[in-house]
Image (spheres, rainbow, N blue to C red):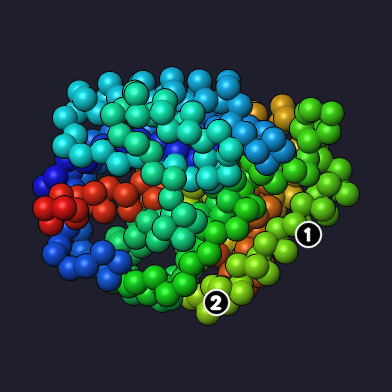
Amino acid sequence: MTRVAAVDCGTNSIRLLVADVAVSNSAYGTGQTGELLDLDRRMTIVRLGQGVDRTGRLAPEALERTFAACRDYATIIKELGAERLRFVATSASRDASNRDDFVRGVLDILGVEPEVISGDEEAELSFTGATKELTGRADLAKPYLVVDIGGGSTEFVVGDDAVRAARSVDIGCVRMTERHLVRDGAVTDPPTADQITAMRADIEAALDLAEQTVPLREARTLVGLAGSVTTVSAIAQNLPEYDTDAIHHSRVSYDRVREITTSLLNSTHAERAAIPSMHPGRVDVIGAGALVLLSIMERVGATEVVVSEHDILDGIAFKVAEEAEGGN
């Protein structure tokens, strides 16, 4: 077993996983077996992508929120004695003209340079993390379509034991909210019908783009990742609080997703904030995230989504452990 730390810094949140990991000797991405034991898994909403779609730059206050979380994570990583650390940065830092400020800050705090990975690599890591433990499940037909609905982008990956095709498109929940649901500096509460129509058209155009590369409709099982999807699952189950065990590998029907999406897009900030399982950092963006999920389900004809709490973090951890065991 190798003790590793993985950090995933996205547009809306930064997340940490410290785990003991063992992997087989087969090549990465070819369906190797593995075992992962969580020691610490946590998430902090930092909204790194605040305003990036409009300004092209990371805001100073967003950087400071992110660096504060990094300092907290550095303490945890040291206390648990992780042997290796990999820090992956995704959509917001890919797009920002001042991403060097972000890189320097993370290097100073954690001692590693964040890897601003491509959308394709992000998709492959997400697929590995989400599907490794699904192998052998007779009730889940292959190929899988893994969708990772982030803050700035959504990754689509189709594969069986290995990735067949992947694409990242810019329809994350934060990006869609800022692009379509903000008026005079504030989120419309609730959004207007015209705003929702415009957002839906943007999402559909992005799905057209994704479908040029990824055979979305060939998938037999839809697997949904990240906070928008897990929050929809928590709402569907009427959970009194966010419960990872109840959410992981839950299934939410298309009809229930449609019902929840309609409710969220017609609710006020206060009504959304009052949902027991709602993280405060998702209140303003959950409607957009749910609409992305609903649009995907309609495009592929999915009758349900299988919800996974394991995602790119787990993929990063497996990759780091494999490299350590291989002597890389």
Height in image: 289 above or below 273?
below
Q: Secondary structure at mark 2?
A: loop
C-alpha gap between disc 2 and disc 1: 20 Å
Q: Position of residue 156 (x, y in %)?
A: 52, 63
Q: x and y percent of residue 167 in the render?
A: 53, 64
Whether residue 118 is visible to the viewer of this picture, yes or no, is: yes
Amino acid type for the residue under numbered disc 2: Pro
Precedes in sequence: disc 2 or disc 1: 1
Kind of residue at badge 1: Ala
Q: Give 79 or 220, whichever is nearer the viewer.
A: 79
Q: State whether residue 35 is above or below residue 204.
A: above
Q: Residues within 10 Å of mark 1 (few under 14, many from 20)?
A: few
Residue where numbered disc 1 is placed: 201
Q: What residue is rendered at 78% in x and 35% in y?
A: 182
Instruction: Give the residue at x 42% y 25%.
Output: 105
Query: Which image quadrant for residue 6?
Result: top left
Q: Quadrant of residue 266?
A: top right
Residue 257 in view (yes/no) = no
Q: Is residue 267 left or right of residue 245?
A: right
Q: Nearer the viewer, residue 82 or 249?
A: 82
Q: Which residue is mark 2?
A: 215
Residue at horizontal 58 percent and vertical 22 percent from the top = 60
120 or 231, nearer to the observer = 120
